[in-house]
Image (cartoon, rainbow, N blue to C red):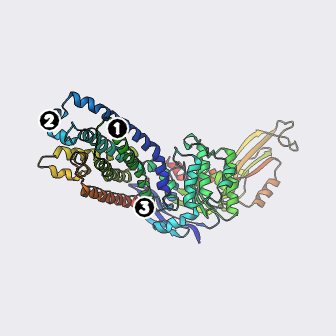
Amino acid sequence: MFEFAWYNGRRRIKGAGALTVGLGLLTALYVYMFPTITSEVNLDEYAESWPPALREAFGVESLSTIEGFLATELYAFGWVILLGLYVAYSAASLVADDVEHGRMDMTLSLPVTRSRVLLETFASMLVPVFLVNLAMPLIVYVGVAGIDESIPVADLVMVHALSIPYLLAAAAVGLVASVTFDRADIAQRAAMGVVFGLFLVDSVTSGTDFSWLGALSPTRYYDPAEILVRSTWDLQGAALLLGVTAVLVLVSRELFRRKDIA
Amino acid sequence: MSAISVNGLTKEYGDVLANDAVSFDVEAGETFGYLGPNGAGKTTTIRTIMGFQSPTTGTATVLGADVRDEAALVEARENVGYLPSNPGFDETATGMEILDLHASVKGDARREELLELFEVPVDRKIRGYSTGQTQKLGLVQAFMHDPDLVVMDEPTAGLDPLVQQRFNEFVRDETASGTTVFLSSHVLSEVRRVCDRVGIIRDGRIVTVERVGDLLDRSGKFVRLGVAGEVAMDDVTLDGVHDLSARPVEGVAAGAPAGGGSTVAGTATELTFTFTGDLNALADFVAELDVLELDIEEAPLEEIFIRFYDDEQVSA
Protein backbone atom coordinates (compact mmCIF):
# COMPACT_ATOMS: atom_id res chain seq x y z
CA MET A 1 0.00 0.00 0.00
CA PHE A 2 0.86 3.69 -0.40
CA GLU A 3 3.45 3.05 -3.11
CA PHE A 4 2.09 5.92 -5.20
CA ALA A 5 1.81 8.24 -2.20
CA TRP A 6 5.45 7.60 -1.28
CA TYR A 7 6.63 7.89 -4.85
CA ASN A 8 4.80 11.16 -5.54
CA GLY A 9 5.45 12.50 -2.05
CA ARG A 10 9.21 12.00 -2.36
CA ARG A 11 9.21 13.85 -5.64
CA ARG A 12 7.58 16.85 -3.95
CA ILE A 13 10.16 17.23 -1.20
CA LYS A 14 12.57 19.31 -3.25
CA GLY A 15 9.90 21.76 -4.41
CA ALA A 16 8.41 22.00 -0.94
CA GLY A 17 11.90 22.65 0.48
CA ALA A 18 12.49 25.46 -1.99
CA LEU A 19 9.10 26.93 -1.14
CA THR A 20 9.93 26.82 2.57
CA VAL A 21 13.27 28.51 2.03
CA GLY A 22 11.60 31.23 -0.06
CA LEU A 23 8.90 31.90 2.49
CA GLY A 24 11.51 31.76 5.25
CA LEU A 25 13.55 34.49 3.57
CA LEU A 26 10.43 36.60 3.07
CA THR A 27 9.60 36.16 6.74
CA ALA A 28 13.10 37.07 7.81
CA LEU A 29 12.86 40.24 5.74
CA TYR A 30 9.50 41.22 7.23
CA VAL A 31 10.64 40.56 10.76
CA TYR A 32 13.94 42.40 10.22
CA MET A 33 12.12 45.43 8.78
CA PHE A 34 9.49 45.58 11.49
CA PRO A 35 11.41 47.66 14.13
CA THR A 36 12.58 50.14 11.51
CA ILE A 37 9.14 50.63 10.03
CA THR A 38 7.31 50.98 13.32
CA SER A 39 9.83 53.53 14.60
CA GLU A 40 9.25 55.75 11.58
CA VAL A 41 5.59 55.36 10.65
CA ASN A 42 2.46 54.76 12.63
CA LEU A 43 1.17 51.85 10.58
CA ASP A 44 -2.23 51.87 12.23
CA GLU A 45 -2.88 55.44 11.13
CA TYR A 46 -1.67 54.48 7.71
CA ALA A 47 -4.00 51.47 7.54
CA GLU A 48 -6.92 53.62 8.71
CA SER A 49 -6.70 55.40 5.38
CA TRP A 50 -7.18 52.12 3.48
CA PRO A 51 -10.65 51.38 2.11
CA PRO A 52 -12.50 48.99 4.45
CA ALA A 53 -12.62 46.27 1.79
CA LEU A 54 -8.85 46.32 1.43
CA ARG A 55 -8.38 46.21 5.19
CA GLU A 56 -10.71 43.23 5.25
CA ALA A 57 -8.93 41.53 2.38
CA PHE A 58 -5.62 41.64 4.19
CA GLY A 59 -7.07 41.05 7.62
CA VAL A 60 -5.68 44.29 8.95
CA GLU A 61 -6.19 44.37 12.70
CA SER A 62 -3.20 46.13 14.06
CA LEU A 63 -0.06 46.75 12.13
CA SER A 64 1.96 48.22 14.98
CA THR A 65 2.31 44.96 16.90
CA ILE A 66 4.45 42.14 15.54
CA GLU A 67 1.44 39.77 15.61
CA GLY A 68 -0.75 42.14 13.65
CA PHE A 69 2.07 42.98 11.28
CA LEU A 70 2.81 39.34 10.51
CA ALA A 71 -0.88 38.48 10.28
CA THR A 72 -1.33 41.07 7.55
CA GLU A 73 1.98 41.08 5.75
CA LEU A 74 2.96 37.43 5.97
CA TYR A 75 -0.07 35.28 6.67
CA ALA A 76 -2.92 37.09 4.88
CA PHE A 77 -0.75 37.43 1.82
CA GLY A 78 1.76 34.57 2.05
CA TRP A 79 -0.54 31.89 3.38
CA VAL A 80 -4.10 32.68 2.40
CA ILE A 81 -3.33 33.91 -1.11
CA LEU A 82 0.10 32.74 -2.18
CA LEU A 83 0.19 29.31 -0.58
CA GLY A 84 -3.50 28.75 -1.25
CA LEU A 85 -2.95 29.39 -4.95
CA TYR A 86 0.23 27.32 -4.95
CA VAL A 87 -1.42 24.18 -3.58
CA ALA A 88 -4.48 24.62 -5.84
CA TYR A 89 -2.12 24.97 -8.80
CA SER A 90 0.00 21.97 -7.82
CA ALA A 91 -2.99 19.75 -7.12
CA ALA A 92 -4.54 20.72 -10.45
CA SER A 93 -1.71 19.00 -12.29
CA LEU A 94 -1.85 15.80 -10.21
CA VAL A 95 -4.10 13.92 -12.63
CA ALA A 96 -4.38 16.19 -15.67
CA ASP A 97 -0.64 16.36 -16.30
CA ASP A 98 -0.30 12.56 -16.23
CA VAL A 99 -3.29 12.19 -18.54
CA GLU A 100 -1.96 14.84 -20.92
CA HIS A 101 1.47 13.21 -21.17
CA GLY A 102 0.28 9.62 -21.44
CA ARG A 103 1.63 8.64 -18.03
CA MET A 104 -1.80 7.81 -16.65
CA ASP A 105 -2.17 4.88 -19.09
CA MET A 106 1.05 3.46 -17.73
CA THR A 107 -0.11 3.84 -14.13
CA LEU A 108 -3.56 2.41 -14.75
CA SER A 109 -2.11 -0.61 -16.57
CA LEU A 110 -0.83 -1.73 -13.16
CA PRO A 111 -3.02 -3.84 -10.89
CA VAL A 112 -4.33 -0.84 -8.93
CA THR A 113 -7.79 0.69 -8.67
CA ARG A 114 -8.39 4.21 -9.88
CA SER A 115 -9.61 5.08 -6.42
CA ARG A 116 -6.26 4.13 -4.92
CA VAL A 117 -4.32 6.03 -7.57
CA LEU A 118 -6.36 9.16 -6.95
CA LEU A 119 -6.29 9.08 -3.16
CA GLU A 120 -2.59 8.30 -2.97
CA THR A 121 -1.74 10.96 -5.52
CA PHE A 122 -3.70 13.53 -3.51
CA ALA A 123 -1.99 12.37 -0.33
CA SER A 124 1.33 13.50 -1.82
CA MET A 125 0.09 17.08 -1.40
CA LEU A 126 0.52 16.59 2.34
CA VAL A 127 4.29 16.92 1.82
CA PRO A 128 4.39 20.63 0.90
CA VAL A 129 1.48 21.47 3.23
CA PHE A 130 3.12 19.88 6.27
CA LEU A 131 6.73 20.74 5.50
CA VAL A 132 5.98 24.45 5.20
CA ASN A 133 3.82 24.48 8.30
CA LEU A 134 6.36 22.60 10.39
CA ALA A 135 9.36 24.69 9.41
CA MET A 136 7.80 28.15 9.35
CA PRO A 137 6.68 28.47 13.01
CA LEU A 138 10.30 27.86 14.03
CA ILE A 139 11.59 30.47 11.60
CA VAL A 140 9.01 33.00 12.76
CA TYR A 141 9.66 32.32 16.44
CA VAL A 142 13.41 32.59 16.14
CA GLY A 143 13.12 35.68 13.93
CA VAL A 144 10.77 37.47 16.32
CA ALA A 145 12.99 36.62 19.28
CA GLY A 146 15.90 38.02 17.29
CA ILE A 147 14.38 41.52 17.24
CA ASP A 148 13.54 41.34 20.95
CA GLU A 149 9.84 40.99 20.33
CA SER A 150 7.69 38.06 21.36
CA ILE A 151 4.73 36.24 19.97
CA PRO A 152 2.44 33.83 21.87
CA VAL A 153 3.62 30.31 21.01
CA ALA A 154 0.13 28.81 21.13
CA ASP A 155 -1.21 31.33 18.62
CA LEU A 156 1.78 30.85 16.38
CA VAL A 157 1.28 27.10 16.39
CA MET A 158 -2.44 27.49 15.75
CA VAL A 159 -2.06 29.92 12.87
CA HIS A 160 -0.10 27.17 11.13
CA ALA A 161 -2.16 24.21 12.34
CA LEU A 162 -5.41 25.81 11.23
CA SER A 163 -3.95 26.73 7.87
CA ILE A 164 -3.62 23.02 7.06
CA PRO A 165 -7.37 22.43 6.59
CA TYR A 166 -7.51 25.63 4.54
CA LEU A 167 -4.66 24.54 2.27
CA LEU A 168 -6.07 21.04 1.91
CA ALA A 169 -9.41 22.52 0.83
CA ALA A 170 -7.60 24.64 -1.78
CA ALA A 171 -5.75 21.53 -2.94
CA ALA A 172 -9.05 19.65 -3.19
CA VAL A 173 -10.40 22.39 -5.47
CA GLY A 174 -7.32 21.80 -7.61
CA LEU A 175 -7.96 18.06 -7.59
CA VAL A 176 -11.52 18.51 -8.88
CA ALA A 177 -10.14 20.66 -11.71
CA SER A 178 -7.47 18.04 -12.36
CA VAL A 179 -9.94 15.21 -12.97
CA THR A 180 -12.29 17.47 -14.92
CA PHE A 181 -9.83 18.73 -17.51
CA ASP A 182 -7.44 16.67 -19.63
CA ARG A 183 -4.91 19.44 -20.00
CA ALA A 184 -2.85 20.49 -17.05
CA ASP A 185 -2.62 24.17 -17.93
CA ILE A 186 -6.40 24.50 -18.17
CA ALA A 187 -6.89 22.64 -14.89
CA GLN A 188 -4.29 24.88 -13.22
CA ARG A 189 -5.90 28.08 -14.44
CA ALA A 190 -9.35 26.87 -13.46
CA ALA A 191 -8.20 25.90 -9.96
CA MET A 192 -6.37 29.17 -9.32
CA GLY A 193 -9.27 31.11 -10.77
CA VAL A 194 -11.74 29.47 -8.43
CA VAL A 195 -9.58 29.85 -5.31
CA PHE A 196 -8.68 33.47 -6.04
CA GLY A 197 -12.23 34.26 -7.13
CA LEU A 198 -13.66 32.93 -3.89
CA PHE A 199 -11.09 34.94 -1.93
CA LEU A 200 -12.22 38.08 -3.78
CA VAL A 201 -15.89 37.31 -3.18
CA ASP A 202 -15.23 36.90 0.52
CA SER A 203 -13.25 40.12 0.87
CA VAL A 204 -15.37 42.30 -1.42
CA THR A 205 -18.72 41.31 0.06
CA SER A 206 -17.45 41.57 3.62
CA GLY A 207 -19.48 44.11 5.58
CA THR A 208 -22.11 44.32 2.83
CA ASP A 209 -25.54 42.72 2.50
CA PHE A 210 -23.90 40.09 0.35
CA SER A 211 -21.46 38.90 2.96
CA TRP A 212 -23.31 35.57 3.04
CA LEU A 213 -21.74 34.89 -0.36
CA GLY A 214 -18.34 34.85 1.29
CA ALA A 215 -19.43 31.79 3.23
CA LEU A 216 -18.72 29.85 0.04
CA SER A 217 -15.07 30.78 0.24
CA PRO A 218 -12.52 28.73 2.19
CA THR A 219 -10.93 32.02 3.24
CA ARG A 220 -13.95 32.71 5.46
CA TYR A 221 -12.92 29.84 7.72
CA TYR A 222 -9.27 30.67 8.18
CA ASP A 223 -8.41 34.12 9.48
CA PRO A 224 -4.77 34.55 10.56
CA ALA A 225 -5.47 37.97 12.12
CA GLU A 226 -8.19 36.55 14.36
CA ILE A 227 -5.79 33.89 15.57
CA LEU A 228 -2.68 36.04 16.07
CA VAL A 229 -4.21 39.29 17.26
CA ARG A 230 -7.26 38.09 19.18
CA SER A 231 -6.27 34.52 19.98
CA THR A 232 -9.58 33.32 18.57
CA TRP A 233 -9.31 29.88 17.11
CA ASP A 234 -12.03 28.96 14.64
CA LEU A 235 -11.98 25.20 15.22
CA GLN A 236 -15.43 24.77 13.74
CA GLY A 237 -14.28 26.50 10.59
CA ALA A 238 -11.29 24.16 10.41
CA ALA A 239 -13.56 21.13 10.82
CA LEU A 240 -15.81 22.47 8.07
CA LEU A 241 -12.81 22.90 5.75
CA LEU A 242 -11.73 19.33 6.42
CA GLY A 243 -15.27 18.18 5.66
CA VAL A 244 -15.31 20.14 2.41
CA THR A 245 -11.92 18.67 1.52
CA ALA A 246 -13.25 15.15 2.06
CA VAL A 247 -16.34 15.85 -0.05
CA LEU A 248 -14.30 17.35 -2.90
CA VAL A 249 -11.84 14.46 -2.83
CA LEU A 250 -14.69 11.95 -2.97
CA VAL A 251 -16.32 13.88 -5.82
CA SER A 252 -12.97 13.83 -7.66
CA ARG A 253 -12.62 10.14 -7.06
CA GLU A 254 -16.08 9.48 -8.50
CA LEU A 255 -15.34 11.64 -11.55
CA PHE A 256 -12.00 9.89 -12.02
CA ARG A 257 -13.55 6.43 -11.78
CA ARG A 258 -16.06 7.25 -14.50
CA LYS A 259 -13.63 9.11 -16.66
CA ASP A 260 -12.44 8.02 -20.11
CA ILE A 261 -8.71 8.68 -19.95
CA ALA A 262 -8.04 10.64 -23.11
CA MET B 1 -10.61 -19.87 -22.23
CA SER B 2 -9.70 -16.99 -24.53
CA ALA B 3 -7.07 -14.65 -23.19
CA ILE B 4 -8.92 -11.73 -24.77
CA SER B 5 -12.48 -11.85 -26.03
CA VAL B 6 -13.90 -8.77 -27.72
CA ASN B 7 -17.65 -8.87 -28.25
CA GLY B 8 -19.40 -6.26 -30.34
CA LEU B 9 -17.19 -3.53 -28.96
CA THR B 10 -18.30 -0.10 -30.08
CA LYS B 11 -16.67 3.15 -29.03
CA GLU B 12 -17.85 6.56 -30.09
CA TYR B 13 -16.02 9.83 -29.48
CA GLY B 14 -18.73 12.37 -30.14
CA ASP B 15 -19.58 11.86 -33.80
CA VAL B 16 -16.59 9.67 -34.51
CA LEU B 17 -17.17 5.94 -34.50
CA ALA B 18 -13.69 4.70 -33.60
CA ASN B 19 -14.70 1.07 -33.10
CA ASP B 20 -17.83 -0.34 -34.70
CA ALA B 21 -19.00 -3.68 -33.29
CA VAL B 22 -15.49 -5.09 -33.14
CA SER B 23 -15.39 -8.80 -32.26
CA PHE B 24 -12.52 -11.28 -32.10
CA ASP B 25 -10.90 -13.71 -29.72
CA VAL B 26 -7.27 -14.13 -28.79
CA GLU B 27 -6.62 -17.69 -27.67
CA ALA B 28 -4.39 -18.43 -24.71
CA GLY B 29 -0.82 -19.02 -25.85
CA GLU B 30 -1.05 -17.48 -29.29
CA THR B 31 0.53 -14.37 -30.73
CA PHE B 32 -2.13 -12.23 -32.29
CA GLY B 33 -1.39 -9.29 -34.56
CA TYR B 34 -3.85 -6.44 -34.75
CA LEU B 35 -3.31 -4.75 -38.06
CA GLY B 36 -4.54 -1.58 -39.61
CA PRO B 37 -3.31 1.76 -40.84
CA ASN B 38 -2.98 4.70 -38.49
CA GLY B 39 -6.39 5.91 -37.38
CA ALA B 40 -8.17 2.61 -38.07
CA GLY B 41 -9.11 2.16 -34.41
CA LYS B 42 -6.40 -0.18 -33.09
CA THR B 43 -5.46 1.98 -30.15
CA THR B 44 -9.13 2.52 -29.28
CA THR B 45 -9.64 -1.24 -28.95
CA ILE B 46 -6.47 -1.66 -26.94
CA ARG B 47 -7.23 1.19 -24.53
CA THR B 48 -10.74 -0.11 -24.03
CA ILE B 49 -9.65 -3.64 -23.21
CA MET B 50 -7.09 -2.20 -20.79
CA GLY B 51 -9.91 -0.37 -19.02
CA PHE B 52 -8.72 3.20 -19.70
CA GLN B 53 -12.04 4.03 -21.30
CA SER B 54 -15.42 2.34 -21.20
CA PRO B 55 -17.11 0.89 -24.27
CA THR B 56 -20.10 2.75 -25.69
CA THR B 57 -21.77 -0.62 -26.28
CA GLY B 58 -20.52 -4.17 -26.30
CA THR B 59 -17.71 -5.32 -24.11
CA ALA B 60 -14.56 -7.38 -23.85
CA THR B 61 -12.98 -9.72 -21.37
CA VAL B 62 -9.31 -9.92 -20.46
CA LEU B 63 -8.21 -13.18 -18.82
CA GLY B 64 -11.89 -13.70 -18.06
CA ALA B 65 -12.44 -10.29 -16.45
CA ASP B 66 -15.07 -8.00 -17.94
CA VAL B 67 -13.47 -4.66 -18.77
CA ARG B 68 -16.49 -2.87 -17.28
CA ASP B 69 -15.87 -4.50 -13.90
CA GLU B 70 -12.97 -2.60 -12.34
CA ALA B 71 -12.38 -4.96 -9.42
CA ALA B 72 -12.17 -8.02 -11.69
CA LEU B 73 -10.00 -6.18 -14.21
CA VAL B 74 -7.56 -4.98 -11.55
CA GLU B 75 -7.13 -8.55 -10.36
CA ALA B 76 -6.61 -9.76 -13.92
CA ARG B 77 -4.02 -7.03 -14.54
CA GLU B 78 -1.65 -8.71 -12.10
CA ASN B 79 -1.06 -11.11 -14.98
CA VAL B 80 -1.13 -8.60 -17.80
CA GLY B 81 1.79 -6.62 -19.19
CA TYR B 82 1.13 -3.49 -21.20
CA LEU B 83 3.20 -1.39 -23.54
CA PRO B 84 1.47 1.67 -24.98
CA SER B 85 2.59 3.35 -28.16
CA ASN B 86 4.99 6.10 -27.04
CA PRO B 87 5.05 5.02 -23.39
CA GLY B 88 4.89 7.98 -21.01
CA PHE B 89 7.13 7.96 -17.96
CA ASP B 90 7.91 10.54 -15.32
CA GLU B 91 10.81 12.31 -17.01
CA THR B 92 12.33 13.48 -13.75
CA ALA B 93 12.77 9.89 -12.57
CA THR B 94 15.48 7.42 -13.51
CA GLY B 95 14.53 4.21 -15.29
CA MET B 96 15.37 2.33 -12.10
CA GLU B 97 12.99 4.45 -10.01
CA ILE B 98 10.17 3.73 -12.46
CA LEU B 99 10.91 0.02 -12.45
CA ASP B 100 11.05 0.05 -8.64
CA LEU B 101 7.62 1.70 -8.48
CA HIS B 102 6.13 -0.78 -10.93
CA ALA B 103 7.82 -3.68 -9.15
CA SER B 104 6.34 -2.62 -5.83
CA VAL B 105 2.82 -3.16 -7.16
CA LYS B 106 3.21 -6.03 -9.61
CA GLY B 107 6.53 -7.78 -8.96
CA ASP B 108 9.73 -8.03 -11.01
CA ALA B 109 10.83 -11.66 -11.14
CA ARG B 110 12.43 -11.17 -14.56
CA ARG B 111 13.76 -7.62 -14.31
CA GLU B 112 17.49 -8.44 -14.39
CA GLU B 113 17.20 -10.87 -17.27
CA LEU B 114 15.22 -8.36 -19.35
CA LEU B 115 17.56 -5.48 -18.58
CA GLU B 116 20.44 -7.60 -19.86
CA LEU B 117 18.52 -8.36 -23.04
CA PHE B 118 17.33 -4.84 -23.81
CA GLU B 119 20.13 -2.72 -22.28
CA VAL B 120 18.28 0.24 -20.81
CA PRO B 121 20.37 3.00 -19.18
CA VAL B 122 18.41 2.63 -15.93
CA ASP B 123 20.61 4.93 -13.85
CA ARG B 124 19.95 7.92 -16.07
CA LYS B 125 16.95 10.22 -15.89
CA ILE B 126 14.29 9.42 -18.43
CA ARG B 127 14.42 13.00 -19.72
CA GLY B 128 17.68 12.04 -21.45
CA TYR B 129 16.35 8.84 -23.05
CA SER B 130 16.07 8.39 -26.80
CA THR B 131 12.80 7.11 -28.24
CA GLY B 132 14.30 3.63 -28.53
CA GLN B 133 15.54 3.63 -24.93
CA THR B 134 12.13 4.70 -23.65
CA GLN B 135 10.55 1.94 -25.72
CA LYS B 136 12.98 -0.61 -24.29
CA LEU B 137 12.20 0.54 -20.74
CA GLY B 138 8.53 0.05 -21.65
CA LEU B 139 9.27 -3.48 -22.83
CA VAL B 140 11.12 -4.35 -19.63
CA GLN B 141 8.27 -3.16 -17.42
CA ALA B 142 5.70 -4.95 -19.61
CA PHE B 143 7.36 -8.34 -19.18
CA MET B 144 9.18 -8.09 -15.85
CA HIS B 145 6.40 -9.56 -13.68
CA ASP B 146 6.21 -12.60 -15.99
CA PRO B 147 2.63 -11.96 -17.09
CA ASP B 148 0.36 -14.49 -18.84
CA LEU B 149 -0.80 -11.91 -21.35
CA VAL B 150 1.09 -8.98 -22.84
CA VAL B 151 -0.71 -6.25 -24.79
CA MET B 152 1.50 -4.01 -26.92
CA ASP B 153 0.53 -1.08 -29.11
CA GLU B 154 3.03 -0.66 -31.96
CA PRO B 155 5.85 -2.24 -29.96
CA THR B 156 8.59 -1.97 -32.56
CA ALA B 157 8.08 1.72 -33.27
CA GLY B 158 11.30 3.55 -32.48
CA LEU B 159 13.46 0.44 -32.22
CA ASP B 160 16.47 0.17 -34.48
CA PRO B 161 16.56 -2.89 -36.79
CA LEU B 162 18.92 -4.88 -34.58
CA VAL B 163 16.76 -4.37 -31.52
CA GLN B 164 13.67 -5.14 -33.59
CA GLN B 165 15.22 -8.45 -34.48
CA ARG B 166 16.04 -9.13 -30.83
CA PHE B 167 12.47 -8.19 -29.99
CA ASN B 168 11.05 -10.61 -32.56
CA GLU B 169 13.18 -13.46 -31.23
CA PHE B 170 12.17 -12.53 -27.71
CA VAL B 171 8.46 -12.57 -28.57
CA ARG B 172 8.81 -15.97 -30.24
CA ASP B 173 10.54 -17.34 -27.13
CA GLU B 174 7.84 -15.89 -24.92
CA THR B 175 5.10 -17.46 -27.01
CA ALA B 176 6.94 -20.77 -26.94
CA SER B 177 6.93 -20.64 -23.15
CA GLY B 178 3.17 -20.04 -23.09
CA THR B 179 2.75 -16.26 -22.89
CA THR B 180 -0.13 -14.84 -24.89
CA VAL B 181 0.88 -11.81 -26.92
CA PHE B 182 -1.47 -9.28 -28.48
CA LEU B 183 0.26 -6.62 -30.51
CA SER B 184 -0.83 -3.99 -32.95
CA SER B 185 1.06 -2.76 -35.96
CA HIS B 186 0.68 -1.05 -39.26
CA VAL B 187 3.80 -2.78 -40.56
CA LEU B 188 2.72 -6.13 -41.92
CA SER B 189 6.14 -7.59 -42.53
CA GLU B 190 6.75 -7.11 -38.79
CA VAL B 191 3.67 -8.98 -37.79
CA ARG B 192 4.11 -11.99 -40.02
CA ARG B 193 7.46 -12.77 -38.41
CA VAL B 194 5.99 -13.27 -34.96
CA CYS B 195 2.22 -13.72 -35.18
CA ASP B 196 0.12 -16.86 -35.46
CA ARG B 197 -3.03 -15.02 -36.39
CA VAL B 198 -3.96 -11.54 -37.44
CA GLY B 199 -7.06 -9.42 -37.20
CA ILE B 200 -7.30 -6.61 -39.71
CA ILE B 201 -9.22 -3.49 -38.78
CA ARG B 202 -10.24 -0.73 -41.12
CA ASP B 203 -12.36 2.31 -40.36
CA GLY B 204 -13.22 0.85 -36.97
CA ARG B 205 -14.52 -2.44 -38.37
CA ILE B 206 -12.87 -5.84 -38.39
CA VAL B 207 -12.23 -6.88 -41.99
CA THR B 208 -10.86 -10.34 -41.38
CA VAL B 209 -9.37 -12.53 -38.69
CA GLU B 210 -7.28 -15.43 -39.93
CA ARG B 211 -4.08 -17.38 -39.58
CA VAL B 212 -1.05 -15.68 -41.04
CA GLY B 213 -0.40 -18.85 -43.09
CA ASP B 214 -3.94 -18.83 -44.52
CA LEU B 215 -3.66 -15.20 -45.35
CA LEU B 216 -0.42 -15.91 -47.20
CA ASP B 217 -1.95 -18.93 -49.02
CA ARG B 218 -4.91 -16.88 -50.05
CA SER B 219 -2.67 -14.10 -51.18
CA GLY B 220 -0.56 -16.59 -53.16
CA LYS B 221 2.96 -16.34 -54.53
CA PHE B 222 4.68 -13.58 -56.36
CA VAL B 223 6.24 -15.07 -59.52
CA ARG B 224 8.87 -13.48 -61.76
CA LEU B 225 9.68 -15.56 -64.80
CA GLY B 226 12.22 -14.78 -67.51
CA VAL B 227 11.81 -16.80 -70.69
CA ALA B 228 13.58 -16.87 -74.05
CA GLY B 229 11.59 -15.69 -77.01
CA GLU B 230 8.48 -13.62 -77.16
CA VAL B 231 5.57 -14.51 -74.94
CA ALA B 232 2.29 -12.66 -75.18
CA MET B 233 0.04 -12.19 -72.20
CA ASP B 234 -2.59 -14.32 -73.95
CA ASP B 235 -0.17 -17.24 -73.99
CA VAL B 236 -0.39 -17.49 -70.21
CA THR B 237 -3.38 -19.76 -69.90
CA LEU B 238 -2.84 -20.76 -66.31
CA ASP B 239 -5.63 -20.68 -63.71
CA GLY B 240 -4.98 -18.51 -60.66
CA VAL B 241 -2.86 -15.83 -62.32
CA HIS B 242 -3.49 -12.24 -61.24
CA ASP B 243 -1.98 -8.90 -62.09
CA LEU B 244 -0.07 -10.36 -65.03
CA SER B 245 2.41 -8.24 -66.85
CA ALA B 246 4.78 -9.17 -69.67
CA ARG B 247 7.59 -7.07 -71.03
CA PRO B 248 10.39 -7.72 -73.47
CA VAL B 249 13.88 -7.63 -71.97
CA GLU B 250 17.46 -8.19 -72.98
CA GLY B 251 17.72 -11.95 -73.06
CA VAL B 252 20.20 -13.89 -70.97
CA ALA B 253 21.46 -16.96 -72.77
CA ALA B 254 20.02 -20.16 -71.42
CA GLY B 255 22.56 -22.10 -69.47
CA ALA B 256 24.60 -19.01 -68.54
CA PRO B 257 25.49 -18.92 -64.83
CA ALA B 258 22.81 -17.16 -62.87
CA GLY B 259 23.50 -13.60 -61.87
CA GLY B 260 26.44 -12.90 -64.13
CA GLY B 261 28.64 -14.04 -66.95
CA SER B 262 28.36 -13.03 -70.51
CA THR B 263 25.01 -11.87 -71.74
CA VAL B 264 23.92 -12.55 -75.26
CA ALA B 265 21.63 -10.09 -76.85
CA GLY B 266 18.43 -11.77 -77.89
CA THR B 267 14.72 -11.67 -77.49
CA ALA B 268 13.37 -12.53 -74.09
CA THR B 269 10.29 -11.80 -72.03
CA GLU B 270 9.86 -11.14 -68.33
CA LEU B 271 6.53 -12.23 -66.90
CA THR B 272 5.44 -11.15 -63.44
CA PHE B 273 2.22 -12.21 -61.76
CA THR B 274 0.66 -13.19 -58.48
CA PHE B 275 -0.24 -16.86 -58.45
CA THR B 276 -2.94 -18.36 -56.24
CA GLY B 277 -3.49 -21.63 -58.14
CA ASP B 278 -2.00 -25.13 -57.88
CA LEU B 279 1.79 -25.10 -57.78
CA ASN B 280 1.91 -28.33 -59.86
CA ALA B 281 0.08 -26.56 -62.65
CA LEU B 282 2.61 -23.75 -62.40
CA ALA B 283 5.46 -26.29 -62.60
CA ASP B 284 3.91 -27.89 -65.69
CA PHE B 285 3.45 -24.50 -67.32
CA VAL B 286 7.05 -23.53 -66.64
CA ALA B 287 8.30 -26.86 -67.96
CA GLU B 288 7.00 -25.99 -71.43
CA LEU B 289 9.11 -22.83 -71.59
CA ASP B 290 12.76 -22.03 -72.13
CA VAL B 291 13.32 -20.59 -68.66
CA LEU B 292 16.06 -18.01 -68.13
CA GLU B 293 15.16 -16.92 -64.63
CA LEU B 294 12.55 -17.92 -62.06
CA ASP B 295 11.74 -16.31 -58.70
CA ILE B 296 8.84 -17.46 -56.57
CA GLU B 297 8.25 -15.52 -53.36
CA GLU B 298 5.49 -15.10 -50.87
CA ALA B 299 3.39 -12.17 -51.88
CA PRO B 300 4.33 -9.27 -49.64
CA LEU B 301 1.71 -8.73 -46.95
CA GLU B 302 1.67 -5.09 -47.93
CA GLU B 303 0.07 -6.19 -51.18
CA ILE B 304 -2.62 -8.16 -49.37
CA PHE B 305 -3.11 -5.22 -47.16
CA ILE B 306 -3.64 -2.95 -50.12
CA ARG B 307 -6.29 -5.35 -51.36
CA PHE B 308 -8.17 -4.95 -48.09
CA TYR B 309 -8.00 -1.22 -48.53
CA ASP B 310 -8.94 -1.17 -52.19
CA ASP B 311 -12.12 0.79 -51.58
CA GLU B 312 -10.21 3.38 -49.67
CA GLN B 313 -7.72 3.74 -52.49
CA VAL B 314 -10.50 4.12 -55.01
CA SER B 315 -12.22 6.80 -52.99
CA ALA B 316 -8.90 8.54 -52.41
Q: Which mark is residue A48?
A: 2
As shown in the figure, which amino acid type bears the numbered disc 3? Ser
Q: CA distance from mark 2 to mark 1?
A: 27 Å
Secondary structure of residue under mark 1: helix
Residue placed under numbered mark 1 in the picture = A143
Are dots 2 and 3 in contact, CB under 8 Å?
no
Apparent side of residue A55 relative to residue B14 in the rendered image (left or right): left
Label 1 neighbourhood size at 10 Å, few (<14), some (14-19), many (20+)? many
Q: CA distance from mark 1 to mark 3?
A: 43 Å
| Label 2 vs label 3, nearer the camera | 2
Kindly tell me whether residue A189 is visible in this rendering: no
Of residues B103 and B146, which is closer to you in this image?
Answer: B103
Q: Name the residue furthest top.
A: A40
Subunit of mark 2? A
Up-down relation of residue A27 to residue A209 (above or below): above
Of residues B222 and B84, which is closer to you in this image?
Answer: B84
Q: Are marks 1 and 3 on the same chain?
A: yes
Of residues B115 and B244, which is closer to you in this image?
Answer: B115
Residue placed under numbered mark 3 in the picture = A115
Say whether disc 2 or disc 3 marks the residue closer to the N-terminus.
2
Up-down relation of residue B4 to residue A141 (above or below): below
Q: Name the residue furthest bottom.
A: B1
Subunit of mark 1? A
Up-down relation of residue B76 to residue A68 (above or below): below
Q: Residue B161, image x and y in percent? A: 68, 45
Q: CA distance from mark 2 to mark 3?
A: 51 Å
Secondary structure of residue under mark 2: helix
Secondary structure of residue under mark 3: helix
